[in-house]
Amino acid sequence: MVATPIPPINYPESLPVSGRREEIARALQTHQVVIVCGETGSGKTTQLPKIALEMGRGLGAGGRGLIGHTQPRRIAASSVAKRIAEELNSPLGEVVGFK
């Protein structure tokens, strides 16, 4: 199986989480559990998986792996997956998907 290349990762600077991505990445690197609190619409749901991906998380042997992200409802999971895929300029199901 050939790994799908990771597209360039961009962060909307208007989102507070985007502005703190280096701090968040350092926390993820040094701690087993990280809790990120922020207002609704701050980018927690869409930007944290991209930060993890940029750090190399989810890239297993051969360049394929998983970054898990849970949502309470299937419709929320599909909406988040579509949004992240859109932000990565990647078709849903290549780099980003949902179950």
Image (cartoon, helix red, strand yellow):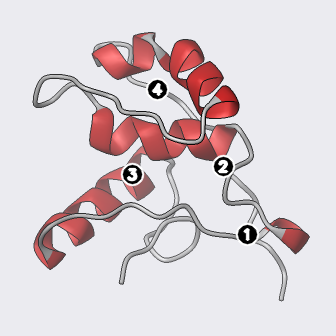
Q: Residues within 10 Å of mark 4 (few under 14, many from 20)?
A: some
SS assignment at label 4: loop
Viewer-proximal residue, 19 or 9?
19
Are the residues tagged 3 and 4 within 8 Å (C-beta)?
no
Label 2 sits on a secondary structure element that is loop
Say what amino acid the circle numbered 2 marks.
Pro
Quarter-of-image position of residue 65: bottom right
Q: Residue at x 12, y 23 (%)?
A: 39
Label 3 to label 1: alpha-carbon separation: 16 Å
Q: Residue at x 36, y 33 (%)?
A: 35
Structural crowding at the residue carrying mark 1, measured as other residues with C-alpha within 10 Å and reported as few (<14), some (14–19) or many (≥20): few
x%, y% of residue 43?
A: 28, 31
The kind of residue tagged 4 is Tyr
Compared to residue 87, the image places residue 2 above or below, namely below
Find residue 66 and report its horizontal and vertical position in percent: 60, 68
Counting residues from the start of the chain, the first of labels 2 and 3 encountered is 2
Q: Secondary structure at mark 3?
A: helix
Residue matched to label 4: 11
4 or 1: tag closer to the N-terminus: 1
- Against 29, is 66 above or below? below
Q: Is residue 14 left or right of residue 12?
A: left
Mark 3 and mark 4: span between their CA atoms? 11 Å
Q: Quadrant of residue 61?
A: bottom right
Instruction: State whether residue 38 is above or below residue 78.
Output: above
Quarter containing the N terminus: bottom right
Q: Position of residue 97 (x, y in %)?
A: 44, 73
SS at mark 1 in the image: loop
The residue under label 3 is: 84
